Amino acid sequence: MTNQTDPLVLFMPSGKRGRFPKGTQVIDAARDLGVYVESVCGGRGICGRCQCEVQEGNFAKHGITSSNDHISPLGEKEKFYASKRELKEGRRLSCSASIEGDLVIDIPQELQINAQVVRKADDGRHIDRNPAIQMCYVEVEEPDMHKPLGDIDRLLQAITKEWGFEDIKIDFSLLQTVQKTLRKGKWKVTAAIHRESETARPHLIAIYPDLKNEAYGVACDIGSTTIALHLVSLLSGATIASSGTSNPQIRFGEDLMSRVSYVMMNPDGDKAMTNAVRESINELIGNVCKESKVSREDILDLVFVGNPVMHHLFLGIDPTELGGAPFALAVSGPIDTYASELDLQVNQGARLYMLPCIAGHVGADAAAVTLCEGPHRQDKQMLVVDVGTNAEIVLGNRKRTVAASSPTGPAFEGAEISCGQRAAPGAIERVRINPETLEPRVRVIGIEPWSNEDGFEALATKIGVTGLCGSAIIEVVAEMYLAGIITEDGVINGDLAQKSDRIIQEGRTFSYILWRGKQQLAITQNDVRAIQLAKAALYAGIKLLMDKLEISEVDSISFAGAFGTFIDPKYAMVLGLIPDCDLKKVKAVGNAAGYGAKMALLNQDYRREIEVVVTKIEKIETALEPDFQKHFVNAMAMPNKVEPFPKLATQVKLPPRQDPSNSAGVPKRRGGRSGGRRAR
Amino acid sequence: MTNQTDPLVLFMPSGKRGRFPKGTQVIDAARDLGVYVESVCGGRGICGRCQCEVQEGNFAKHGITSSNDHISPLGEKEKFYASKRELKEGRRLSCSASIEGDLVIDIPQELQINAQVVRKADDGRHIDRNPAIQMCYVEVEEPDMHKPLGDIDRLLQAITKEWGFEDIKIDFSLLQTVQKTLRKGKWKVTAAIHRESETARPHLIAIYPDLKNEAYGVACDIGSTTIALHLVSLLSGATIASSGTSNPQIRFGEDLMSRVSYVMMNPDGDKAMTNAVRESINELIGNVCKESKVSREDILDLVFVGNPVMHHLFLGIDPTELGGAPFALAVSGPIDTYASELDLQVNQGARLYMLPCIAGHVGADAAAVTLCEGPHRQDKQMLVVDVGTNAEIVLGNRKRTVAASSPTGPAFEGAEISCGQRAAPGAIERVRINPETLEPRVRVIGIEPWSNEDGFEALATKIGVTGLCGSAIIEVVAEMYLAGIITEDGVINGDLAQKSDRIIQEGRTFSYILWRGKQQLAITQNDVRAIQLAKAALYAGIKLLMDKLEISEVDSISFAGAFGTFIDPKYAMVLGLIPDCDLKKVKAVGNAAGYGAKMALLNQDYRREIEVVVTKIEKIETALEPDFQKHFVNAMAMPNKVEPFPKLATQVKLPPRQDPSNSAGVPKRRGGRSGGRRAR
């Protein structure tokens, strides 16, 4: 019903635009264009959630000159709101202001209404919001003997009338509290409505007296080693607080398979582990609530991801079947249930969503990484790698995506390396070897200068140099190869013992002395073999997927997880962990699993997206593929005997190694943070 | 796609018919016509639930000559079934037999498959079945590393493929057991699928290994005084066992309002009453399971009815709001939830349905009575009365139905009568007074002869004659009126003391000595007044509803509950409890509330029906109606001063009172059964 003389309205930052007749309310225009604008009070001008800003000026590119007389003057509702709470200069309420001419309107993306909430620095990416929970303020008719509908029935009628939800179902536990809540709020309440999907039957899951202008969610990644949990405002999208802890299941077994074995050997072992992980999560929820002064009662939605064994144990499912072929998952589809079913201490009606698993070895965490990076959303070939005890690998584009899990073992995490250790002060994290003298320089966590620079000695004496963390293990083997200490087939060249006293014989093989201090740190032939095996497994898995897609190179590589954050992609490429790729297109994406969980928390469209994507991803079981063994053997070489290896050595231009302080392009490790051991 | 030369098939007892091409399977023809045929195995010929019988002979009225060569010969599946279990002579499996010519096919209505189940005599009425739960036998694909769908996901796929249910949701608790169940059943399992409505999303609520050829439900009426519970086969419709008990809440208060007061005075008083009633129900479930050797685990659906206070307390809702105007129900709509939410010890996934309430004083029990009797299903004006401490009254037809609750008080139950008592051996249940001599004859519970017959004395000495139960109280007052002992305004006529020594003066009023024995039982002026008040309240309520409908007479009267079962409708009419009506159209309908619950248990269409009906019933709050008081005062007279009273006296033809053994038309009381005190 619009025509070309109607005002043109452009919404930022989405860039969506359309023409609307004069007098159209801004919120209606936004919703008409699919611009998400939060509103809790249903246009009564009391929640302030629908604030917008009119941009003034000439937006020639868009053919718009916007000015503040193109919008209706401040109305009664806005004046009332401004008198009760703060309405910043230039801010308007979308439910009150109407369009009177061409406009450029900015919808602030992370609007904080409640002052006590401390805004945490987020990772800068923006997630479009469409949460599964909607807060709906309503005014309910008082009981009337002539129309004896129940209190709940009148409440549901009001929600239907004012918010358009039809055939609402109410959670059983609310039956017991609804009468008190309605009377406490003097027949004004805020209802939390949840839908499992946009078309699903709406469920009333919580009721608060009067206007309830906040609602929170939790996004959590349950790793084998660590659990990371984030408290997120469902109304602003902001991450309010984060907390992490070691997975308490470690006491039942360091790695996944030893935990599965524990269950097989101990009746009710699974229950003990289930309780342990749920207790930890309850503690983490307590931490983030305390930090941000948010009540557990205000947490209404929770999204969890984890590898298949963590997924099963968290859900209370015996993981025994995952311990052997055919690695049958109890359930691979998404889980949509009540948090109370998992004994989580949040609002009684709070919902819980778990992303689907891709396969018996490729879990909901890999699904979340996939959702975050989105190989299925692009035309180019994207490789996504999440390295832990196993490496989950997803490769493809919008046409076709394949996934596998490759048994890298824990070497990349330093677990099978003679001088490996967790990333902690005193651990070597960077290594350079002079190919002429074979003398090394190292950088140590907690010590700013390199080992050949002023000030290092004093700090090293104080802190101690105790081992190599994951990133250094990759670097030292790569540098040894580049310096010629290791041959192409991975043998430490004993002939060099004549040239340098750092090459020493131990039995029938040789070692390289990386560090001589209080503790001597040597890289043994076994260490090199362990890295060779791990990198061969990873590369063979990747190569297998590339074969499936019939491609010989990838367009981009996303390294997820802590390991990816701290290793230098150049060295990963030198060693042949990853295939040939433009270095600029190799990026560390951090906790992509946790970020994927947050996406699913804030926007139910992402849930639908990943649910469809996992069914389309082709799962490759490395153990069943004859080529895997062949690729594995080839990849034992330094770098790899397979394509695109021959191209690699000439392509990788390492930065000049003369200036040790030149760390451009080398990710900085933050002191003391755990890295490189994020087993999953 | 059928034509007039195709065989004609008539299904009995439904009478549904249609033409089907030769070769059509009987089960497909039945379903096509909407004839409910159970099948658990999905046409594999192993459950035997779809048995039918071919009627042979000439059905001239229907133009059908049926013979056994009009149906396919016994097939392999049938032979196999007959070899494993019993297939009676003439019986066929609908999933195996196909139509080869005109047929009359009988679908046995209550097929018992499991021999250990004892069939209980039912009340003879037939309920068409369409339960909310369907048992679905499926064979599930084994796990395959190439297609790593979870076990549950493959199970759901199989159910979708074989049973047509789409987008099935699985109950959370099943995640933990599904893998063991699938393996125990060697990938053959029976899934119980529940839908809240025909169009609602199907939920998988239970899984049994292999073929599970039974499923049970519970129908329960929670009265203020007694709880009655029935175990019903969801697959055959048969009532397997019944059990009843006193409502344990009686210790918190005899009547409803004293229980509400208890809650108001005692914090957590509601929780104590909730626990008490739930425990009782768990015990009753234990009783019926034990009696019928059915496992609690096989109970999958439960339907409850009760008055508003019982409804709320059972659901765990504080009933305080029901204690005063505006008598706000927490919820009036239907409840559809899990039995586990109410701590009922049945299958973990079992569902629970509670019928909607009509109003704050007219509960789910009145809704069930309405569903059972169906005033809304007919053109004639039907009056349904359920008498307890309050009388619930529903009146109307398919065009318009009205309902009210009238405060009769407990006089009809004998509670305010000087010689009233519970129906038990020794209680007088029938009374006749000779209008000439004013001498009474009585019949006593537990004694077969009337008091003037041989053999009475001996038994009376042994058992004792201790009081009057509800039915006798009505009769004695009516007989006193008919004998002229009571005047039209309810005064015991003292002048008659000269004629009979049974009329005695007590203070300023007179009494009638009904019984002289060890205990003297007298009907006092106060007793007559109490009955007057109760009957006036009941009649005024009925009259109010008749006024609303602008009718002066009703076409039929259904008396629900124990009171209705044991009183003689003639006397109810003499006293003016109920309006003028053809006596043949006055019937006692027994526990219509329990029967309505059973209807809703066996056929979800009845749930939808009553959900719609209650919203259409007009609720009349007697306290708000100025005419109620007027009707009440008029109805204090014996019988009533209001229309249609003048017609009544001439219409009621009492049976000859000469022959005391002539009990034709008088409902027989079974010895010792509680009657006349079913307060609600």
Image: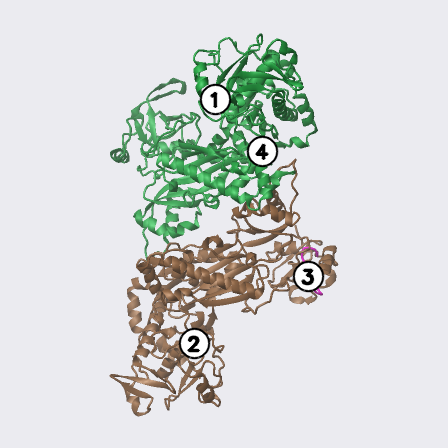
Chain colours: A green, B brown
The residue labelled by disc 4 is A362
Label 4 is placed on what type of residue? Val
Marks 1 and 4 sit apart, C-alpha to C-alpha, by 34 Å
Q: Can residue B71 be seen in this view?
A: no
Quarter location, residue B530: bottom left
Label 1 is placed on what type of residue? Gly
Report if the CB atoms under discs 2 and 3 are less than 8 Å apart: no
Which sits earlier in the primary sequence, circle 2 or circle 3?
A: 3
Magenta part of the protein: which range? B88-97
Marks 2 and 3 sit apart, C-alpha to C-alpha, by 53 Å
Question: Which residue: 33% across, 27% down?
Answer: A53
Front label number (2 vs 1)? 1
Q: Which label sits on residue B423?
A: 2
Q: In this view, does A410 lie above or below B62?
A: above
Q: In this view, does B627 lie above or below A674?
A: below
The chain letter under disc 2 is B
Mark 3 burial class by Cα count in 10 Å: few <14, some 14-19, many 20+? many
The residue labelled by disc 3 is B103
